[in-house]
Amino acid sequence: MPKSEKVSLVENVDAELIKTDEVDLTKHAAKTLNSEMDQLRNIVFGSAKADLDARIYELQLEMQAGFQQAAEMLKHQMSEMHLALQESTSSLEDRIGQVDSHYDYKTSEIEKNADQLSETIELNNANGGQEVDGLNKRIDREVLDLTDTFTQKHDQTIDLLNQMKRELNSSKTDKKTLAKLLATVASNLEIEGDN
């Protein structure tokens, strides 16, 4: 390798080493600067930062305790609400059961009464039918009896009138005797009509 190339290679390597050293020095300086800044901050703001950190930590603890207490209260309230809901549901189920049993009882009573009324109506219809049949037969007998009676009375009256007519024709009676005779017939008819 020629000497000029060696020199150039050494220069390149030296340049790179210088760059690397510069980067390392820059990093080292930055770390040192940060460290010094941290020390300065700690000196200037150290106690305030420590108080602030402590206060933030206390607030975190208080918030966690508050959240835990709120969660427990919510859990307790939910438990009470669930229990109250179960009791209300149970109470409603009991009342519905009572209403159902009362409804069933009333329904059975109404059905019993309806059956009794139906039986009574059937019995009355049967008795009423028999009574109506008996009444119709009795009326028919009475009508026949009355018809026979009036037919006999009518026939007797006709016979009596025919007899009077014959008597009047055979004997020449005067008007007074005829009037008396007709009055007698009329009163006889009234007496028979009343009977």
Image (cartoon, rainbow, N blue to C red):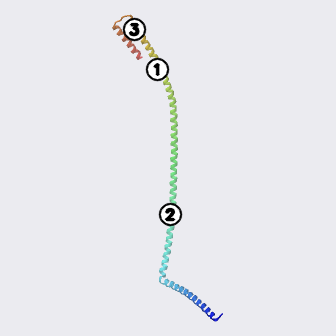
Give the crowd class for mark 1: few <14, some 14-19, many >=20 residues within 10 Å. Answer: few
Q: CA distance from mark 2 to mark 3?
A: 128 Å
The image quadrant where one finds the N terminus is bottom right
Residue 84 is situated, as x and y percent measured from the top left of the image, at 50, 57
Indicate the quadrant where residue 184 lies. top left
Residue 73 left/right relative to 20? left
Nearest to the observer: residue 190 or residue 83? 190
Q: Nearer the viewer, mark 2 or mark 1?
A: 1
Local secondary structure at mark 2: helix
Q: Which disc is residue 52 wearing?
A: none
Q: Please tell me whether residue 1 is drawn above or below residue 54 in the rendered image.
A: below
Local secondary structure at mark 1: helix
Q: Which residue is mark 3?
A: 165
Q: CA distance from mark 1 to mark 3?
A: 32 Å
Residue 111 is situated, as x and y percent measured from the top left of the image, at 52, 39
Mark 1 or 3 closer to N-term? 1
Residue 23 is situated, as x and y percent measured from the top left of the image, at 56, 87
Residue 179 is situated, as x and y percent measured from the top left of the image, at 35, 10
Residue 17 left/right relative to 173? right
Mark 2 or 1 closer to N-term? 2
Furthest-top residue in this view = 171
Local secondary structure at mark 3: helix
Q: Which disc is residue 74 wearing?
A: 2
Furthest-right residue in this view = 1
Residue at horizontal 35%, vertical 9%? 178
Mark 2 or 3 closer to N-term? 2
Name the residue type under label 2: Leu
Give the crowd class for mark 2: few <14, some 14-19, many >=20 residues within 10 Å. Answer: few
Nearest to the observer: residue 172 or residue 75? 172
Name the residue type under label 3: Lys
Q: Which residue is mark 1?
A: 143
